[in-house]
Image (tube, rainbow, N blue to C red):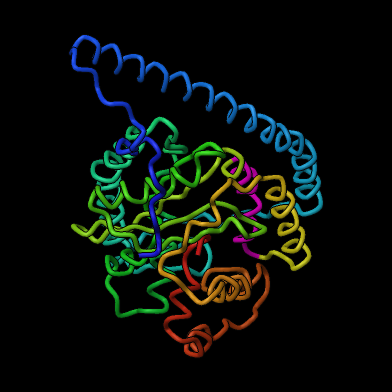
Amino acid sequence: MGIDRAEDPDAADHRPDRPAPPDDPTEASKAVLADAQQRAELQRSYHARVDHTYDTTRSGCTEALPDLRAAWEKHVENYPEGERPVPSTLPDGSWTDGSDRRLTPERNADASEASADIHTEGKEAILPAMRRVEAADPDRHLSGLEHMLKGEDRLKEKIADILFVESDLSVRQALAKVPDAVRFTLTYGQQRYAEGVLSDVERLKSEGFELVRLKNLWPEEQYKGINSQWRNPETGLRFEVQFHTPESLAAKQLTHKAYERLRSTGITQAERDELAEYQRRAYVAVPIPPGSASIKEFPITNGRTNHLLRDALRGRLPGTSDWRVPSGQNRPRPDRRGFFAQLEVGVLAASLFSRAW
């Protein structure tokens, strides 16, 4: 499947130079205790060395923060943010995102019910499994659980975009195409990152989830980490698991407002370029964890063609700035259907609906 679990050094009990156990049970107990104490001491020593290296690296990232924060304040001053559209349910029961996305009253009701079901499954089925993965090894932890569930209005935006392209789908069929209605983040230290990711991919499979996609984005300039999509085969629910180091997670959080600006309406090319440069500056200070390059993507694709195409099309997809009529203007509504008709289905599927893909 393109992902190989790293060897476990603690599992090599078959070594030929391992001493035979003593005949006396009491002596055997002492030997086991001594061996355990020795291993614990070696582990503490190893972790101390790793943490020293990690703290040195982290200090470099910390030093970059004041300049990045100052750069963001200057950006906000140069490009004041306009008023954001406010999603709402209209008196007739239909839904709008405040701009050009719409759901009929029937579809809005279905979307509300489906969103509630997803939130319930995320909290009652997926989260307990993720807690078990977290508890299996102390070298990782779940981060950002307050953002685990995508909000109802955000889900409706995704549904509206999908139904615009595939109008014959039901709301639940459209929602099944959203890869991150529920999302989790696992964080690891630098030196234990690669082994931790490989181990946890296998643990998620052992929980019964199906791996849909895994993207190694450490080589990228404006985002670093590993993002994966999973499916619960019992319900069809897709969810996202991101694998980060503390530094890459901090950079993601630092650049989140820039990412939101890139999704907003009316953004100029000059601002888009400045936001892209800001994200590059934030991530250039993020160290790449050892072994991360060996974590293979799934499914294997021919280079990064789909990823580059996504970047080229960003801003030209339904609901993004180039498709919307600026306030106070009467620009004719573009023929989005004609544009999508020119794209092959496989390319379209690889290009829509997620920051990570």
Closer-to-camera residue (325/2): 2
Q: Judge from the rendering whether residue 19 lies leftward or rightward of residue 145; answer left or right.
A: left
27 is higher (above) or lower (below) than 155: above
Q: Residue furthest top?
A: 26
- Residue pictured at 48% horizontal, 61% vertical: 215
Q: Is residue 143 above or below residue 173?
A: above
Residue under the image location 58 percent in, 46 percent down:
289
Q: Up-down: is 120 above or below 349? A: above
Residue drawn 70% across the image and 38% down it: 61
The reply to whether residue 54 is visible in this rendering is yes
Left or right of 171, for residue 357? right
Stretch of the chain drawn in magenta: 250-265
Prevailing secondary structure class for the magenta stretch in the rendered image: helix
Q: What is the tally of numbered marks visible in this picture?
A: 0
Q: Please indicate whether residue 140 sits to the left or right of residue 306 in the image.
A: left
Q: Nearer the viewer, residue 58 or 169?
A: 58
Q: Is residue 97 magenta?
A: no
For the N terminus, which image quadrant?
bottom left
Give the x, y percent position of residue 288.
Answer: 62, 48
- Residue 209 lies, with reference to residue 106, above or below; the image says above
* Quadrant of res 10: top left
Q: Is residue 264 magenta?
A: yes
Q: Nearer the viewer, residue 92 or 174?
A: 174
Residue 214, horizontal then vertical, whole percent = 43, 60
Residue 260 location (% of width, % of height): 60, 54
**Residue 354 x/y as whole percent:** 48, 62
Residue closer to the observer: 85 or 127: 127
Residue 150 appears in the figure: no
